[in-house]
Image (cartoon, rainbow, N blue to C red):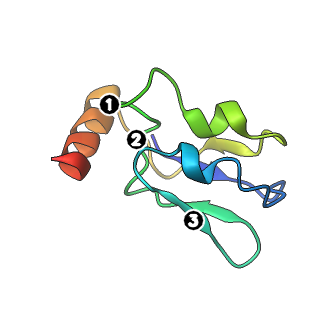
Amino acid sequence: MALMINEDCTLCDACVTECPNDAISEGDELYVIDAFKCTECVGAEDEPQCQLVCPPDCIEEHPDFRETREELQAKYEALHG
């Protein structure tokens, strides 16, 4: 499943460079994660790197994007060839 950033985001910028899929960008009021690019780091890392570096712990599971590990791996491979 993809991740999302909630309203506790402080715009600290820590998560942006950690994403192997370039799925995180600055939105109007907080950073946003493109659910179609987010693989929870499956294919690149053992766990979501953005969650590891997020000081306010504002990155959580996206309720509308439930995916299996296999689906996340396939998405990663499609993004990276």
Q: Which residue is drawn at 67% across and 53% down?
A: 5
The amino acid type found where label 3 is placed reads Ser
* First in residue order: circle 2 vs circle 3: 3
Helix, strand or loop at mark 3:
strand
Question: Could you tell me if residue 3 is visible in this image?
Answer: yes
* Residue 38: image location, x then y, percent: 43, 48
Describe residue 34's horizontal placement relative to residue 26 as left or right. left
Q: Which residue is drawn at 57% across and 65% down?
A: 25
In whole angstroms, how far apart are the C-alphas of marks 1 and 2? 8 Å
Q: Which residue is drawn at 78% across and 39% down?
A: 57
* Residue 51: image location, x then y, percent: 65, 35
Task: Between label 1 and label 2, give the one nearer the viewer.
Answer: 1
Give the label on residue 43, or none. 1
Mark 1, residues whose alpha carbon is within 10 Å: few (<14), some, or many (≥20)?
some
What residue does disc 3 label? 25
The amino acid type found where label 1 is placed reads Gly
What residue does disc 2 label? 39
Q: Is residue 69 above or below residue 2?
A: above
Q: Which of the 4 quarters of the picture holds residue 70?
A: top left
* Residue 59: image location, x then y, percent: 68, 44
In whole angstroms, how far apart are the C-alphas of marks 2 and 3? 15 Å
Q: Which of 20 and 63 is in front in this view?
A: 20
Helix, strand or loop at mark 1:
loop
Q: In this view, does 63 lie above or below 9?
A: above
* First in residue order: circle 1 vs circle 3: 3
The amino acid type found where label 2 is placed reads Thr
Circles 1, 2 touching at the beta carbon (< 8 Å): yes
Q: Is residue 7 above or below residue 40?
A: below
Residue lying at the far bottom of the rendered structure: 28
